[in-house]
């Protein structure tokens, strides 16, 4: 008679027993664990749990109770809980201290400067931002202090409009490679990319600002390459103290509509932009940045009625959207940037050249014309123990060319010397005082018999600003 042997005494069956008791529950536990990790954000060491079972020889599964125990805790945050809310508002009071004898007072970046001295809400921003997933970050910023195009600037104001609405798609875990899709700032000009909440002067200079306008933004797709060490540097510099522009990549390449943010495209030819920048620490505590950038495309110029040189019948200049220029006019721009960050003494300068739409000298047509211009600025940061940070500054800017983003693209010269001081009383409050000597083209069209459009405002302006950060 063959003696009875327990089935699990055979070596092969012994191995099978170990597999069934040890590895199979572990495999099932791994699957269960992945679901729990998604729901609860917990990390489990299932391999070690399974190994303990095998080594102990205990055939009673203990992995599941361990999972249940480790899964206790707070539930992981939803994507909406990863968003942060912030923003700023700028309240100004402007005074024209010298109106001059030419055109009415005007500053392109400040609609509060005109015939009436008054309080204005220059910007009222609300920012929603955050990385909602490992490979997606979003940024949404409306402005509630907008005067819509086509409205009377004296009465139609403080409307809400999208400034930024985009997603950053991270290709890799380190966020070195990313694609920015949506409406965002175009990487052309340090001052254009720099937030108005961080900039020392109250507004951007005309020469660089008119390159990508209105509002320095447009709808498109831009690729950015930023090594991890430069990501940290950009992050550390992006604040009111050091006046950084933020992370717009060491290399940026993209295409966009070309008409400006919150405006519909008027032709089928996208603009292209490219930028290369390199920030580095020259010595301990001092950072410098050098950039080169360019853009090109066919810009459609919006037209309006004027009387050329103040004589003859009213007409819309040829070459505008309303008069034969719906296909657009070629523009190409090339700019260089140098920034010496104000660790105490700071210096910043940008200059660009190229061709862009501009009104002819006889004011009858808009065509591609040469331009050049730029600015240079010095500032000094004074930190105190009890009275915040004081930053006096002085900026000189000049432009010889066309205001291609304005109606009829008026062409002429612009000179401005601005001096001021910014007081960062504390994180949530900044006060500024700025005095400007101005000699520039007034870009408002005039359609009256005997009235010459685009004369020069040669005068001075004094402005005060209170900025609230939240």
Image: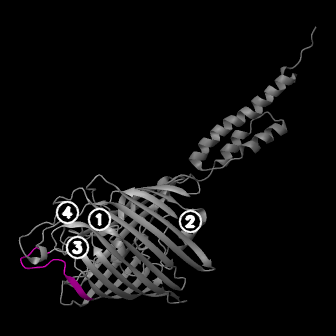
- Residue positioned 24% across, 74% down in the render: 411
**How many neighbours does mark 1 have within 10 angstroms: few (below 14), some (14-19), or many (20 or more)?**
some
Residue 231, which numbered label? 2
Q: Which of pointers 1 and 2 lies earlier in the amino acid sequence? A: 1
Q: Which residue is mark 3?
A: 410
- In the picture, the quarter occupied by the N terminus is top right
How many tags in the picture?
4
**How many neighbours does mark 3 have within 10 angstroms: few (below 14), some (14-19), or many (20 or more)?**
many
Choose mark 2 or mark 4, whichever is in front: 4
Percent from the top left, x then y, of residue 238? Answer: 50, 72
Q: Are marks 1 and 4 in contact (CB under 8 Å)?
A: no
SS at mark 1?
Answer: strand
- Chain part drawn in magenta: 446-459
Residue 160, which numbered label? 1
Q: Which of pointers 3 and 1 lies earlier in the amino acid sequence? A: 1
Q: Which of pointers 4 and 3 lies earlier in the amino acid sequence? A: 4
Please tell me which residue lies in front, 388 or 6.
Answer: 388
Q: CA distance from mark 3 to mark 1?
A: 28 Å
**How many neighbours does mark 2 have within 10 angstroms: few (below 14), some (14-19), or many (20 or more)?**
some
Q: Are marks 4 and 3 in contact (CB under 8 Å)?
A: no
């Amino acid at each position: 008679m063959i003696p009875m042997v327990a089935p699990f005494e055979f070596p092969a069956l012994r191995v099978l027993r170990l597999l069934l008791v040890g590895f199979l529950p572990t495999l099932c536990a791994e699957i269960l664990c992945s679901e729990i990790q998604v729901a609860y954000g917990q990390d489990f060491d299932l391999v070690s749990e399974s190994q303990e079972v095998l080594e102990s020889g205990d055939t009673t599964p203990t992995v599941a109770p361990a999972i249940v125990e480790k899964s206790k805790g707070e539930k992981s945050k939803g994507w909406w809980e990863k968003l942060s809310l912030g923003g700023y508002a700028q309240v100004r009071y402007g005074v024209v201290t010298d109106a001059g004898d030419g055109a009415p007072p005007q500053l392109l970046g400040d609609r509060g400067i005109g015939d009436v001295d008054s309080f204005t809400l220059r910007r009222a921003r609300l920012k929603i931002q955050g990385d909602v997933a490992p490979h997606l970050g979003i940024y949404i910023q409306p402005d509630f202090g907008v005067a819509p195009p086509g409205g009377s600037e004296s009465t139609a104001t403080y409307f809400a409009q999208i400034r930024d609405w985009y997603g950053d798609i991270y290709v890799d875990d380190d966020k070195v490679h990313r694609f920015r899709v949506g409406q965002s700032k175009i990487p052309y000009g340090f001052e254009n990319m720099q937030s108005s909440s961080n900039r020392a002067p109250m507004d951007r200079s005309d020469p660089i600002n008119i390159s990508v306008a209105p509002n320095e933004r447009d709808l498109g797709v831009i690729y950015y390459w930023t090594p991890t060490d430069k990501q940290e540097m950009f992050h550390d510099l992006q604040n009111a103290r050091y006046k950084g522009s933020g992370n717009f990549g060491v290399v940026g390449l993209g295409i966009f509509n070309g008409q400006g943010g919150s405006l519909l495209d008027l032709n089928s030819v996208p603009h292209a932009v490219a930028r290369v920048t390199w920030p580095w620490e020259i010595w301990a505590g001092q950072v410098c940045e050098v950039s080169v950038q360019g853009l090109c495309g066919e810009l459609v110029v919006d037209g309006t009625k004027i009387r050329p040189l103040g004589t003859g019948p009213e007409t819309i200049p040829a070459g505008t959207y309303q008069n034969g220029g719906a296909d657009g006019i070629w523009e190409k721009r090339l700019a260089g940037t140098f920034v010496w960050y104000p660790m105490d003494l700071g210096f910043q300068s940008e200059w660009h050249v190229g061709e862009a739409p501009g009104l002819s000298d006889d004011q009858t047509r808009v065509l591609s014309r040469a331009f050049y211009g730029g600015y240079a600025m010095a500032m000094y940061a004074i930190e105190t123990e009890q009275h915040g940070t004081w930053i006096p500054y002085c900026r000189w800017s000049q432009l010889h060319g066309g205001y291609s983003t304005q109606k009829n693209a008026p062409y002429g010269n612009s000179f401005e010397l601005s001096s001021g001081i910014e007081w960062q009383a504390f994180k949530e409050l900044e006060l500024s005082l700025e005095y400007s000597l101005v000699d520039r083209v007034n870009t408002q069209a005039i359609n009256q018999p005997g009235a010459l459009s685009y004369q020069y405002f040669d005068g001075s302006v004094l402005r005060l600003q209170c900025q609230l950060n939240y």
